[in-house]
Every structure is written in C-alpha cells, then in structure tokens.
Image (cartoon, rainbow, N blue to C red):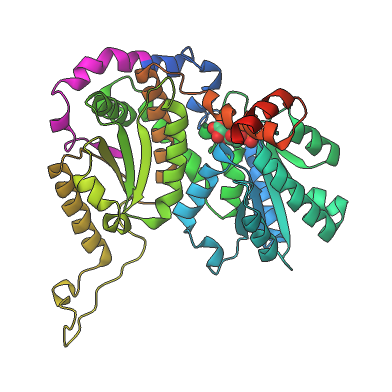
Amino acid sequence: MIQVNLSNMRSFVPENYEANLAQQLHTAHNHLQNHDGAGSDFTGWVRLPADYDKEEFARIKAAAKKIQSDSEALVVIGIGGSYLGARGVIECLCSANYNLKKKSTPNIYFAGNGLSSDQLSEIVELLDGKDFSINVISKSGTTTEPAVAFRFFRRLLEEKYGREEAARRIYATTDRARGALKTQADAAGYETFVVPDDVGGRYSVLTAVGLLPIAVAGVDIDALMAGAQSMMESCAQPELAANPAWQYAAARYALYCAGKKIEILAAYEPNFRFMCEWWKQLYGESEGKENKGLFPASVEFTADLHSMGQYIQQGERHLFETVVRLGASATKNVVPMEENNGDGLNFLAGKDMDFIRQQAMDGTLLAHVEGGVPNIIVQCDKCDAAQLGQLIYFFEYACGMSGYLLDVNPFDQPGVEAYKKNMFALLGKPGYEDLRAELLSKLQ
Ligand code: PA5
C-alpha cells in the first residue's frame, strides 16, 4: 500500500498543523463522500473503482482484443483529461519507448492534443502501410483540437478501408447522449463508450477514456481497477492516521499557508514523465482559481538535477517537492569491474543501478531539505498496474480534498474558456463577429 512520509516537511510548518486542520479535513472529506460540496455534480469518480459499469468494462476488453487482433496501430485522439491519463499509465507501465519495442500489441499514437501540423503529418507517415484503428475521445464532443485531428484520421481510415470497414475501426468515447461526436458516432455506427456525466475530464482516467487505450497496450485493467478500489477504501476512512490522501492534502495545504507556492512532483523514473503531466493537469485545473492554488510543476530526476537542480537547491524558497518513489526496478543491472579502473568507478563495481539510485535519492533529499525545500515522499512498493491504480485514486482523492481546503470548486475549469473564445473569434467562427473585431484591433 502507498505510504506518505512527511518527516522531511514537518520542520517547515507549525508543529500542530494536522490537529489545527482536523475540522477542515473532516468537512472536505464529508463533501466528497456525501457529494454535497461545490461541484458535487462531478464527484462520480469517488465511488467509481467499485461502482463502474461492468457491462461496458467487458466491452472495453472485447474492443481492446479486436484492436489488438486487427490493427498494428491505434490512433488515440483527445486532449487534456481525454488524453493525459492514458498516456501516463501506458508510458509508466509499458515504457515511453513502447512504440519502439518488440511486442504483440499495437503501437499507440496520441493525436489531437495540440495543433501541430508537423506532428499530424508525422503520425500519418508512421501509419503508412499499417492496419490501424482510431479511438476518438471527447466528453463534450466539440473540442477543437481533437475534432480537427479526427477529420484527418477518419478520412485516412475511410480512404484505406472504405466507409463501412472504417466505421468498424472507429471507437468513440464521449457523452452518453449529447454532443457532436455522439451524433456523428450514432449516425456512422461507431462503437461508443461513455464518459459518465458525473466524472470530469481530469478525473476520468479510470473510465473508458483511459481504460480502452490502456487495455490495447496490454495493461491489466482489472488490476488497475482493483488497486484503485483498495485505495478508495483507505481514502474513505475519516481518520488522518489511516488515510494517506488526508495526510498528503493536509501537508501540502500547510506548506502553501507557510509560503511554499510551488509544488514540484519528482520521480526518479523517466517513464513517469506523463504521470507527472497528468498530475499537473489534475491539480492545476482543480486548484488554480480565485487567485489561489499551488502551482504544480514537475521534474525528472536525476536528469533534472543537472538543470533544475541549481534552482531547487538555491533559488527562491517558495517551493516544495513531492517525490514519488516507485520501489524496485523490474530489471537488475550490476556495474561491471574494470581492471584498469580508468574512470575511477570500481568502488561501485558489483553494485546494481537501484542501489546507486537509492543513494542519489537519499543524498538529494538531504541536500534539498538542508537548502530549505520541504520534501514529501509518496512511497510505492513497486511499479505495476495495481500500484498505479492506487496512486491514481490517491492523487484524485487528495486533489478533491485540497480544493475544498482552499475553498474553491475543485471540479470546474472556467478559466479554460478564455483562450477558446478568442481562438474561435480569430478563426471566424459564426457568432463571434464582435469579439473578432475587438481582438483584431488589439493585435494591430
Ligand atoms: O479536465 C478537463 O475537463 C479538460 O482538460 C478536458 O478533459 C479537455 O478540455 C478535453 O475536453 P473534451 O473531453 O470535452 O474534449
């Protein structure tokens, strides 16, 4: 089970911060459990690991099997909450180099997560001569980036297979009843999966949004859900000592109140990079509003100790670190002995990479704490589907708690609309004429 180690942050906050926060923790927890706080319409994820649609779950597994059997590649089209979770889990459990590996499962290309023409062309090129399918994911069904990408890839698929077969290779994950994608899917006869009404994008990785691409990559989604369920049970306990999400939420809130305004999520595993991206969206969109909220950042150690390490050690003292330790590696690599010891490294001969990394972790922890950077350690036993399911739910629950501790609605994202309105106006979308004139005058 995931453990939260707070011994390296306590000296930076009042000794009795947990007791002082007890009432607020209970209130936040009750809002999540009783679905009666701000944004309560979007708290369906709280019970999701137990109360999910089992019939749909079976269909996800069947669709994943079909894609594995008839496709060499799957194009996953989505952005934000409809993208980051799947990529995070696949890279963490199957490697950031997944597509380059020898394997019996399809390559997975993520598209529609930006507006890069070159990225789009590159994926089209990589699909040349390959059998492929598409999973288009959009809760609203109207988000510009994935909708544009879907036009291109749908056409490519239709040109290759004809409309009828293309329709059998398109899987749409969207709202149960509404939106342009749902309408399109029903008209064309695509298999559809549901983003539940009461689960927002950034809390949706354990729905079909994340589960279909994750299953296609060969990850055991039963284990992922079972891990999440075990963490759901821990997080349901209204008691600090038994609830890791309470411990983390209280610690980061106390640090925020003590002037630490930036939280850096760090891991010593490059494959964790997109889990950090997922985490940044989760916390950034949930907390960053009403001029409040920790700024979520991330680093990859030890690589970034040679870049961001300087700032972390000696820059402005407004940050703290949360380090995810993933347990033992799956592989063992022992440093070989060399007779002439030209590089002076024979003192490491016979030691394996995990041992060396452990010393780097401990050395960095002590240096950063000494330099004025509080440290929270999130310790996993190992890196597998069940642990990752635990970790996902742990971060989600602590995020909901954190939003309520800050007294914001953790489940809306009103700020995201501002750029969209301007973009639509500049693109000449009907209905935005006045704003377009105003913006063009500002751009001159
Ligand atoms: O968390 C969120 O709600 C957002 O990041 C959305 O997931 C993102 O904007 C994509 O939206 P949609 O799934 O409607 O295309």
Instruction: Tell me, yes or no, if residue 91 can be seen here.
Output: yes
Residue at the extreme bottom: 340
The quarter in which the N terminus is drawn is top left
Front residue (pair 246, 183) = 183
Front residue (pair 416, 199) = 416
Q: Is residue 382 left or right of residue 229?
A: left
Q: In this view, does 37 lie above or below 208?
A: above
Residue at left 69%, top 31%? 425
Instruction: Tell me, yes or no, if residue 53 can be seen here.
Output: no
Q: Is residue 155 left or right of residue 74?
A: right
Q: Is residue 278 above or below residue 179?
A: below
Query: What stretch of residues is rendered in magenta?
Result: 1-27
The quarter in which the C terminus is drawn is top right
Front residue (pair 65, 95) = 95
Percent across and percent down for residue 201 are 56, 32
Counting every numbered tag in the picture gives 0
Q: In this view, does 127 lie to the left or right of 321?
A: right
Percent across and percent down for residue 309 are 25, 52
Residue at left 12%, top 44%? 370
Percent across and percent down for residue 57 are 62, 39
Question: In the rendered structure, does residue 144 fall within the stretch colored magenta?
Answer: no
Residue at the extreme front: 444
Residue at left 47%, top 41%? 278
Quadrant of res 185: top right
Percent across and percent down for residue 208 are 61, 39
User: Which quarter of the rendered image does ligand 1 occupy?
Assistant: top right
Residue at left 68%, top 59%? 121
